[in-house]
Amino acid sequence: MSERLRTAPTPEGEYFESSRFAGLSFLLGLIAVIALVLCAIGAIVNPHQFSYSWLFAFAFFFTLCAGCFFWTIVHHATDAEWSVVVRRQLENLAALLTVLALLFVPVLLLRHHLFAWMDIPRGVEHLLAALALRRLSARQDKDGNPLFTIWMRRVSFISLPMFALCLTFGAFDWLMSLNYTWFSTMFGVYIFAGAAGSSMSLLVLVITALRQAGYLKDVVTVEHYHIMGKWMLAFSIFWAYIGFGQYMLIWYANIPEETQFFITRNTESWWALSMLLVIGRFFIAFPILLLRSIKTHPHQLCIIAGWIVCMQMLDMYIVVLPALHGTGVHLSIWDLFSVIAIGATLGFVYLRLVPRTSLFPVRDPRLIESLKTVN
């Protein structure tokens, strides 16, 4: 690592100018406040419906941010070079997990409407690891000390099994236990597959938005987009594999305690949404992502990335809401308000967080290799 620093000059860092987007930040903050107030009213007027709506929105954004944390620790654990230039945005998005910890409070307060059990785990381990990795990464920008890279790698090795446990038990306790008589040992992996694929798609959208604003144009290239597109393809396949495997095993065993989950989602109007999810998340995304021309064209890749993020939202909706409306889809205004409230809050915090550090790790010893990445 030290030889890399001696033989290759590093580019100057780029910093997000918050003043250019003060209007957007104010708008997001205003929308967040209004939506949160409306959600507070919903929690009083219709707490039963609102509790499920809020859990759905929380689960959607949690999988996005948790997926970004997963990619961050994998980057460090594998000593990856290609992802150095995009890693800082993964860190910024993963840091939003701390905000989501506060937004989990309504779930705690309304837990009696959701769960037949009371002991909800805090799951703070991966939150602390996300903050530690971002802090070390930002400190490395100041002096370029390679020891920070080594420390971040060690933290990541420790965080990987902790992340797997936290995400799995979070999926079990927050989502699977909505119907506590149903169980699937593959459910945690299914949630992980969706989180990993949708978070990589979110990264593509964020990086492209920054490039559209004039940042990272000389740093992130089509080669990086190509790699991100390949990861989107890989996890579209993995999501379909786990989803089909879970469905096939439960269908073949035909045990009432297991089949009830899919029976509900395969009847009435839930069947239409389930088919839309299967077709949209795999049969549409898979053939498109096979094309190299799509993966190397940022704007075209953004379209499919946005589609995958929407499919992830639909996935979480199908996971959560049938526990409340088992006879069919019943759209509620609280579903929309919950998504807007959490999304606007996270967007506001993200815009406040980004200007604090360079948009890419300017002193990372692997930066030059990342800039020269070729598939």
Image (cartoon, grey):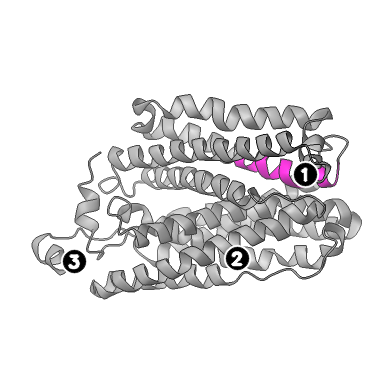
- Cβ atoms under marks 1 and 2 closer than 8 Å: no
The image shows a total of numbered marks equal to 3
Q: Residue 332: image x %, image y %?
A: 82, 42
Towards the viewer: 195 or 160: 160
User: In the rendered image, is residue 367 in sight?
Assistant: yes
Q: Main secondary structure of the magenta part?
A: helix
Mark seen at residue 258: 1
Q: CA distance from mark 1 to mark 2?
A: 35 Å
Residue at the image point whose x is 56% and y is 35% from the top: 240
Q: Residue 225: horizontal and vertical position, in percent?
A: 35, 40
Label 3 sits on residue:
1
Q: Amino acid at mark 2?
A: Val
Asked which secondary structure carries label 2, the reply is helix
What residue is shown at x 50% (from left), y 35% (from top)?
237
Residues in magenta, as a range:
312-325
Label placed on residue 99: 2
Q: Nearer the viewer, residue 76 or 244?
A: 244
**Label 2 neighbour load within 10 Å: few <14, some 14-19, many 20+:** some
Instruction: Based on the picture, tell me whether residue 318 belongs to the magenta stretch.
Output: yes
Query: Residue at the spot x=84%, y=37% of the render?
Result: 330
Q: Residue at x 39, y 46 (%)?
A: 213
Q: Position of residue 163 (x, y in %)?
A: 53, 63
| Quadrant location, the C terminus | top left
Which image quadrant for residue 38?
bottom right
Please tell me whether mark 2 or mark 3 is closer to you in this view: 3
The residue sitting at the left extreme is 7
Apparent side of residue 280 relative to residue 47 in the rendered image (left or right): left
**What amino acid does circle 1 point to?**
Glu
Q: Where is residue 346 shown, x and y percent of the image?
A: 58, 58
